[in-house]
Structures are given as structure tokens and as C-alpha cells.
Image: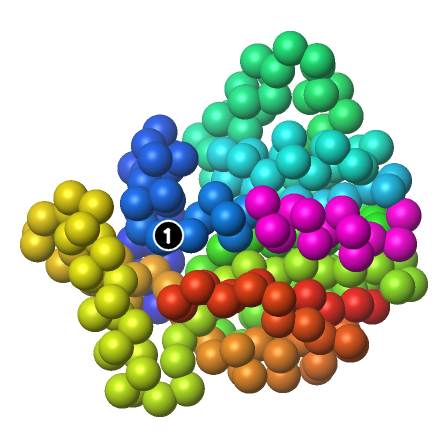
Amino acid sequence: MMEAAADQSEFFRRLAAGYDQAIRRYQVAYDAMLELSTDLTRVAAPGKSRCLDFGTGTGAALPLLLRSFDQVVAIEPGKPMLELARNRLNSAADAVGERVSFIEGTVQSSSVRALPEESFDAVHCSLVLMFVEGDAKKLEVLEFFRRLLRPGGALVLSEIVVADDAATERTRFERWKEIMSHRGADVEFVTAAGRQIDATMHRRTPDELRSLLGQAGFRDFEQPFRALHTEILLGRK
């Protein structure tokens, strides 16, 4: 297990500089997914005061969330990613970065734990939970989200999922490989990407994710988006 965690950390360290380009190559509907997930976060939030962007990465969602929320708190465990997110907003002409707070850490970090309960209208979490190993730890993250949300607050969760059956999963993966090839990826790239998925991702089926959301106390689930192996789930406190 420690080896897998080390592989994951090294993967993100190496990927940081080229992440924005790489994610669009790996994720066939990334831009559409991000636009929709941030739109859903804005319209589903009971208020427009504060939003948490958990696992902010290079901060691609931040300018979109700042269209509606007064403040956004961005949490990211990887320092190289967090620096890129800061730089993204620092270069914005309208100084939107002044409305964003950055925290380097995870749900176990004291700086993250110090966030007040029921202080957010929404939580936006894109392509993060799949890197959390084990249902107990996934549930810990979801319960943490719920504690931070105000009553009626919304969680918008984007995830790479696994199909309910092996045959469907194989079909989806073959389609993904064909798309990668169509986009100019060679066999070596596609093979390496497949290995990376197995080494770093701990995916669940949509039903398993809904079960975890229910265990964490979320309700009123919606599943407004699906593209191959990527889905968006919406739940409320």
C-alpha cells in the first residue's frame, strides 16, 4: 500500500507542470465536465457566500466558481499544483485571487480541520475521491464535506468510475483507447496510461459512490452527467 501511495505522489509531482494539457488528453470530456460541475455548484448552492474547491489541482475551477461565490477556499495536498493555482489567479487582470484562500493539506491536516463547521454553501470536488484508497477513507472525506456544509448545502462530485460489470468496463476502456489513438496518442502512451490508472486510482461504481454518499448523510442524489467512465454526482446535506 505504501508503494502505491508513493507512486501516486511521484505521479502528481511529475505531472504538475503539464497537468492542464495532460488532463484534457486523458479525459475526453474534461472541459465540458468542468463547466457543468461548476455551473451545478453555483446553481445548487443555497447561498453565494463561500464555496470549497477540494483538490483544486492547478485551479482550473476557481475562475468559474468565482463568477458567483464571494469567497472560495481551495485545498490541495500537492505543493507544485497549489503554486500553479496561485499563479493562475495572480495573473488575472481583475484580481479575483484576493477572494481565494489557499490551504495545502488533506482532511487529516490541522489547517484543514480548523475550517468552521457549516461555513460553506457548496463543495466542489473534481477527480479527487478516486485517488483515496479504501471506502473507510473515502467516507471520512465525504463526512468532512458534510460537516463543512450549511443545511441544504450542495456537494458536486466528479469522478472516474468503474462499470458494474467487467464486460462493460472492457468496452468503455477500448473506446477510450480508440479516442486516445484518434487524438494522436501512440500505443506506448495508451499502455502507460492504462498502467497508471491501475496504479493510482481506486475507482468505484456509481452505485457504490451513492452508497458512500448516503452513509455520509447526503440526500437527494442526482446524476446529471456521464461520459464514458466519468460521472458527476450531486448530493445535499
Q: Residue furthest left?
A: 187
Q: Position of residue 162 (x, y in %)?
A: 40, 76
- Judge left or right: residue 11 versus residue 139: left
Q: Quadrant of the C terminus?
A: bottom right
- Judge left or right: residue 66 versus residue 36: right
Q: Would you call the spot at circle 1 few (<14 residues within 10 Å), some (14-19), or many (20 or more)?
A: some
| Residue 22 position by quadrant | top left
Give the vertical position of 189 relative to 194 (above or below).
above
Q: Position of residue 106 (x, y in %)?
A: 60, 50
Give the vertical position of 5 relative to 112 (above or below).
below
Q: Position of residue 235 (x, y in %)?
A: 73, 69
Numbered disc 1: secondary structure = loop
Magenta range: 35-47
> Is residue 198 in view?
yes
Find out whether residue 209 is within the magenta segment: no
Find out whether residue 37 is within the magenta segment: yes
Secondary structure character of the magenta stretch overall: helix
| Residue 85 position by quadrant | top right
What's the residue at 25%, 77% (across, down)?
Answer: 171
Q: Position of residue 67 (x, y in %)?
A: 74, 32
What's the residue at 49%, 26% (across, down)?
Answer: 84
What's the residue at 55%, 47% (across, down)?
Answer: 34
| Residue 93 position by quadrant | top right
The residue closer to the viewer here, 194 or 6, is 194
Q: Which residue is mark 1?
A: 27
